[in-house]
Amino acid sequence: MLKNNFLLSILLIFCLFMSVLAQSQNSNQNEIEEPIIKVNTQLVSFDAQVLNKKTNNPIKGLTAKDFEVYEDNIKQEITNFSQDLLPLSVLLLMDVSGSTQPITYEIQQATKKALELLKPADEVGLMAFAAGTGSLDLFTTNKQTIIDNMEKVRLKTINTGQGTNFKDAIKTSITHMKKFSNPNYRKIVIVITDNIVAKPLAEEKRTIINDLLENSITVSCLVVEDPQRSVPVLSASRPSPSQQQLSNRIATPNFDTFRGGQGPQKPGKGNINSATNRPPSTSRNLPAGTALPPSVPFASDKVDAYVNETGGELFDARRASILEKFVELVDHLRARYSIGYFSSNTKTDGKLRKIKIKVLSTGLEWAIDKDDLVVKSRRGYFSPTQQ
């Protein structure tokens, strides 16, 4: 009898084990058959500048509650917000073509003062451009390194050719920032130029602007001009062969020609690089007071579109102090708001998504109406693509 009870107990335990095992297998099978949902939590970060339209002064002290952000007309929830907390990666992109030669000293002195206004954690890179580009191959928090190498980079660059090839310069700037700058910093390119540059093809220009947006790079510009010149120097001109013959008959000197030694490089100050070596431009620049016949067109362009679409600002120092305007530019950089949100659009299609920012009146002073505000920010970003 005892033996029979023992065998019955063994049989019951075995049945219970098989039942539990069957339930476990069914449970695992159900889990495998359930669809797996992958959610893309793409953080979108960008800078925004809020200006008083009447005074052009930045509006400071706003909070996240004072902003509304829309992506493709769909409101997003702001999750990250700050003002002047993230360090800057600033690339100084200096035009050293013939039209800016007479004011080189003023530009350098203004740059030194502007660098003093940056925070210790802010890093700076240096690049110059004419027909080609030359650069200091690093970003550094030691601002004195930039100051020490400004003249060397300038002289190195003007040896690569004549003209004002901004298209290749800004393309090289994007590559330079991707390679040398801190990826977690706010990226700013400050272009110092007379704003008369060689005109690229429309498709080339759009591609460059898209690259700037994709890499979260803001372009701001300081427009300078030699006050002694009665007419702008057309350093971006690229005349056709027939126009070139006409220019030769006028027999005017080429103002972009400049001679000077590039000087030795000091160890520990970064690598001065001449990234682009091209044959001299065919442009002919006229001295002050010399007018070309109306029948000679020049394919020139401005940097305004690069500035506007990336949310930067343009500061005009042609009739004002270069130092004063450069200091104002840096002050505006310090007043920009950093805004971030997790996009509600989880698609990974690589398409452009447009950003729109609204400023509410809750955080404004009583004397400022929200209709008097100008908000500058990049027009959008490109969503990630599926890997």
Image: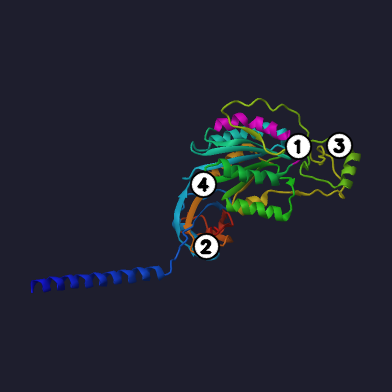
Q: Is residue 311 above or below residue 327?
A: below
Magenta stretch: residue 28 in it? Answer: no
Category of crowding for the residue at label 3, using alpha-carbon neighbours closer than 10 angstroms: few (below 14), some (14–19), many (at least 20) = few
Instruction: Give the distance between the C-alpha atoms of the residues marked 4 and 2, in whole angstroms.
Output: 22 Å
The nearer-to-camera label among 4 and 2 is 2
Q: Amino acid at mark 3?
A: Thr
**Earlier-in-chain disc, 2 versus 3:** 2
Category of crowding for the residue at label 4, using alpha-carbon neighbours closer than 10 angstroms: few (below 14), some (14–19), many (at least 20) = many
Q: Is residue 350 above or below residue 239?
A: below
Residue beneath the point at 40% across and 68% down: 32
**Earlier-in-chain disc, 1 versus 3:** 1
The nearer-to-camera label among 1 and 4 is 1
The nearer-to-camera label among 1 and 3 is 1
Residues in magenta, as a range: 143-163
Q: Position of residue 339 (x, y in %)?
A: 49, 53
Residue under label 2? 70
User: Which label is found at residue 252?
Assistant: 3
Q: Is residue 216 above or below residue 73?
A: above
